[in-house]
Amino acid sequence: MPYVNIKITKEGATVEQKAQIIKGVTQLLVDVLGKNPQTTVVVIDEVETDNWGIGGESVTMRRKRGQ
C-alpha cells in the first residue's frame, strides 16, 4: 500500500488542482511500479509560507524580498 505525502505552500491551490495531483500521482505509481490504485494513498499537506523555510528564512520573507 503506497503512501505519498505531498507538501505545498498554502497559496490557493484549487480543489480541482489538488484532485488532478492526487489522480496523477496515483496513476504514476500504477504505471511505473504496477501499484494497485485502490490501495494507494495520496495526502496533500498545505503549509503556510510562514512555516516553510529555505536558506534560513521563511518563504514569506523571501517573497517579500522578491526571491
Image (spheres, rainbow, N blue to C red):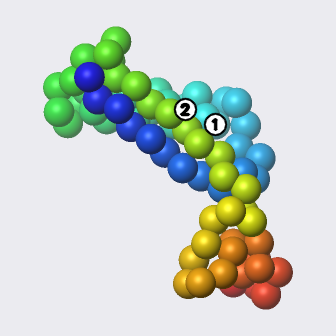
| Quadrant where the image shows the N terminus | top left
Can you say whether 58 is above or below 15 in the image? below
Which residue extends farthest top?
Answer: 38
Mark 1 residue crowding within 10 angstroms, few (<14) / some (14–19) / many (20+): few
Can you say whether 67 is above or below 30 in the image? below
Q: Which residue is mark 2?
A: 20
- Is 9 positioned to the left or the right of 23 in the image? right
- Is 14 positioned to the left or the right of 5 in the image? right
Quadrant housing residue 9: bottom right
* SS state under label 1: helix
For marks 1 and 2, give the CA distance.
5 Å
| Quadrant where the image shows the C terminus | bottom right
Query: Where is residue 35 shown, x and y percent of the image?
Result: 22, 24
Taking the spot 59% from the left edge, 84% from the top edge, the residue there is 56
Taking the spot 45% from the left edge, 31% from the top edge, the residue there is 42
The residue under label 2 is which amino acid type?
A: Gln
Query: Where is residue 55 shown, x and y percent of the image?
Result: 56, 84
CB atoms of marks 1 and 2 within 8 Å: yes
- Is 39 positioned to the left or the right of 23 in the image? left
Taking the spot 50% from the left edge, 33% from the top edge, the residue there is 43
* SS state under label 2: helix
Mark drawn on residue 17: 1
Mark 2 residue crowding within 10 angstroms, few (<14) / some (14–19) / many (20+): few
Query: Where is residue 52 shown, x and y percent of the image?
Result: 63, 65
- Is 21 positioned to the left or the right of 37 in the image? right
Taking the spot 70% from the left edge, 30% from the top edge, the residue there is 15
Mark drawn on residue 64: none
The residue under label 1 is which amino acid type?
A: Gln
